Image (cartoon, rainbow, N blue to C red):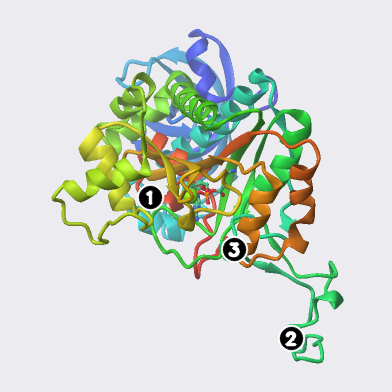
Amino acid sequence: MESCSRVKISKIKEMEPGEKILVKGWVRTKRGNKNVTFVALNDGSSVSNVQIVLDGSKFSEESLKGVTTGASIGVFGVLVESPGKGQALEISADKLELYGTADPNSYPLQKKGHTMEFLREIGHLRPRTNTFGCIFRIRHAMAYAIHKFFNDKGFYYLHTPIITASDAEGAGAMFQVTTLDLSNPPRKECGAIDYSKDFFGKSANLTVSGQLEGELGALALGEIYTFGPTFRAENSNTPRHLSEFWMIEPEMAFYEIKENMDLAEEFIKYLVKYALDNCIEDLRFLNDMFDKELIQRLEDVVNTQFVRLSYTEGIEILINSGQKFEFPVSWGTDLQSEHERYLVEKHFKKPVILTDYPKEIKAFYMKQNSDGKTVRAMDVLFPKIGEIIGGSQREESLEKLQSRVEELHMDPSSLWWYLETRKYGTVPHAGFGLGFERLLLFVTGMTNIRDVIPFPRSPKNAEF
Ligand code: 4AD
Ligand code: MG
């Protein structure tokens, strides 16, 4: 079996008939008769299977009994031109090794199609389907492309903490981290829990965003990005929210909102183009099986200029649209996904960057405009998704930042280190956060965010 080294099935197309070959993988299907058996084998390297031909003179029916859908095997043989359609080359087998059987009566991934809901219940096995193979290969390629994009531009990858004592977004939707005995926590005289006795000597939580620490990096290294898991304890059971999701957060010294928007647009187009250039086989599969307009939509985004307009102008368009929305719109309200998608899909028919939102619906750190009402926020809105990026220019004035912290009744003592960057060598700066799974929803055409992360975390769900 080990007389030559294992070849990934994706590499077979680079080989010639007559070459000896060893492949290992999982059986997708088996068919045939006494004289000959055909096995479709997949090893995760590509959506395409390789066909294995097992001649009845070399392999008895008895020796192939364990080779059923889901079983794992190794095959040594010779590459031959395939007379059948669907593949140029197939493997004429000389030796077979059965690693593990998969009982046909219980193995859930038999040949028939399965619903996405059912596949979510078998998260431990769904990576073995064509669909999830495609999605996770694309996910890998996008992660790689993100690092390549920033590295080529001279940005530094900064690791921001996962456990933190601050609430970066000021939204309060945090998972607490504690080693206190929950049935009998230490208490202060007033009855409140005494967090000075907790592991970190204060109350701590999982990060909702690496931005605040990212700013510290940008105000020293110039241009940085983070790329890590973030956690939100909001009870949002929607196809676009996860409790644990990955976010990419670039932060740049000396950028104002215009350069921030330019970077966001360039970044997304780069990633989508990277997928088209490097994942086309997987994209074609998803296009054919799920969404016949997927590839067209990806190409459109690469070739179109995003619309840029203010929140105020966006609200006017929505009010004048005559459209009945589930949530009514007026100046000052936060935009719902239905509003965002109306602007993108119906009105402009292209991605939109919306700027200058009312300060009341945005985080404390955003740069205040001179009108006293709005802040220099920028959200990138995408077809099928709604908000894919949220960002802003940051308030660099110590005085204005402090007064906003007071207005919002935030505790300045927990933010002393953040405020000090405005005291010492403050500069205009800006950044944004791209939700990695929202990007993947767009690139794969999937409609539920739980299908673009291997092991989704959402309210009442932490299986696997
Ligand atoms: O708009 P958000 O909350 O912005 C921030 O966290 C800023 N600190 C980013 C920054 O300026 N550095 O989140 C940014 C993006 C959203 O646009 C969305 O794509 C994604 O993160 N996101 C989520 N994705 C999945 N599930 C959730 N619950 C998400 N919440 C936000
Ligand atoms: Mg946002």
* Residue at image coords 70%, 34%: 427
The image quadrant that residue 293 belongs to is: top left
* Residue at image coords 80%, 81%: 194
Mark 3: amino acid = Glu
Q: What element does badge 3 sit on?
A: helix
- Mark 3 vs 2, N-terminal side: 2
> Mark 2 packing: few (<14 Cα in 10 Å), some, or many (20+)?
few
* Residue at image coords 17%, 46%: 321
Query: Which residue is at the front of the view, 82 or 199?
Result: 199
| Quadrant of the snapshot with the C terminus | bottom right
Mark 1: amino acid = Gln
Mark number displayed over residue 192: 2
* Mark 3: C-beta under 8 Å from nearest atom of ligand 1: no
Check the image and report above or below for 345 versus 4: below
Q: Nearer the viewer, mark 3 or mark 2?
A: 3
Mark 2: amino acid = Ala
Q: Which residue is mark 1?
A: 110
On the image, the x and y values in percent for residue 452 come to 46, 45
Mark number displayed over residue 191: none
The image quadrant that residue 132 belongs to is: top left
* Residue located farthest toward the left when viewing the structure as drawn: 322
Q: What element does badge 1 sit on?
A: loop
- Mark 2 vs 1, N-terminal side: 1
On the image, the x and y values in percent for residue 224 come to 69, 32
| C-alpha distance separating marks 1 and 3 | 60 Å
